[in-house]
Amino acid sequence: MAFQPQLRVVSTSTAAQNCTTTPCHAAQIHHRILSQVKSILFNGPTSPGEAWIYEYAKCIRGDLDARNMKFQVSILQKGFEASSLVFPPAPGFLHDVCQLIAMLPLKVGTVIERKLVIDLLLEAARQCNMAWWDSTREVSAVVFGVVHACMIYRHLEAEKQGDAELGMIMGKMDLEADHIETVMQLAESLEEGLKL
């Protein structure tokens, strides 16, 4: 199933009629956005903003690797902290949601559907009578927090896989102890250079 967002006219009010964007121009904008999303999905993300688009588009498209997540309290909390910086929810939301995450009846490491985590958090907020549980903005913040956590988890897993592959390559090389130390120093220098 291909990712195909729909573009539709919502209003014909005077303000909408005064808009200088023609249907042709809107279609061009739609095409550019769709092309950009397809490129990110095909080539992978090259920036944090593209990583967000990549994760969200995979989720919307229903990719198998975007349906489920591994339940990790700390990563979920970091996801909510990060998304709250970009998409500020109501005061107290972050504190509330971090408490709700800790209360969920899930074992760390359990593989679970993202949608179920979102539903569990919203239901827990409703049952705890949190002021924001039915607010559109905070419901969206729950979705963004879970998606952001999945993005963080995907990044950490890719980093682990890269380290494991490097270790495997190093293990196959027959290096003496002094050569291994030199290679490790070069790797550290390269890492420092990349941080700049």
Image (cartoon, grey):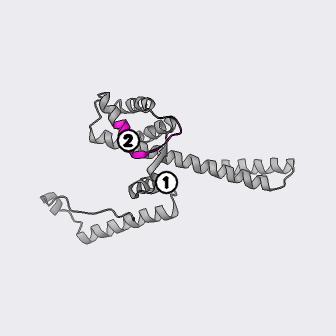
Residue 118 numbered tag: 2
At horizontal 33% and vertical 62% (from top left) the residue drawn is: 5
- Image side of residue 187 versus residue 73, left or right: right
Q: Where 71 sits versus 30, above or below? A: above
Q: Where 32 sits versus 93, above or below? A: below
Q: Nearer the viewer, residue 170 or 35?
A: 170
Q: Nearer the viewer, residue 145 or 184?
A: 145
Percent position (x, y) of residue 143?
A: 37, 44
Instruction: Assign a secondary structure to mark 2.
Output: helix
Percent position (x, y) of residue 42?
A: 49, 64
Q: Is residue 196 visible?
A: no
Q: Cα distance, mark 2 to mark 1? A: 17 Å
Q: Residues within 10 Å of mark 2 (few under 14, many from 20)?
A: some
Which region is colored magenta? Answer: 107-122
Q: Amino acid at mark 2?
A: Ile
- Image side of residue 191 versus residue 18, left or right: right
Q: Amino acid at mark 1?
A: Asp
Q: Which residue is mark 1?
A: 65
- Image side of residue 63 versus residue 187, left or right: left
Q: Where 110 sits versus 102, above or below? A: below
Q: Nearer the viewer, residue 151 or 104?
A: 104
Residue at the far left: name it: 14
Quarter holding residue 35: bottom left
Quarter holding residue 173: bottom right
At horizontal 38% and vertical 65% (from top left) the residue drawn is: 34
- Residue 123 counted in the magenta span: no
Percent position (x, y) of residue 157?
A: 58, 48
Q: Is residue 64 visible?
A: yes
- Residue 110 counted in the magenta span: yes
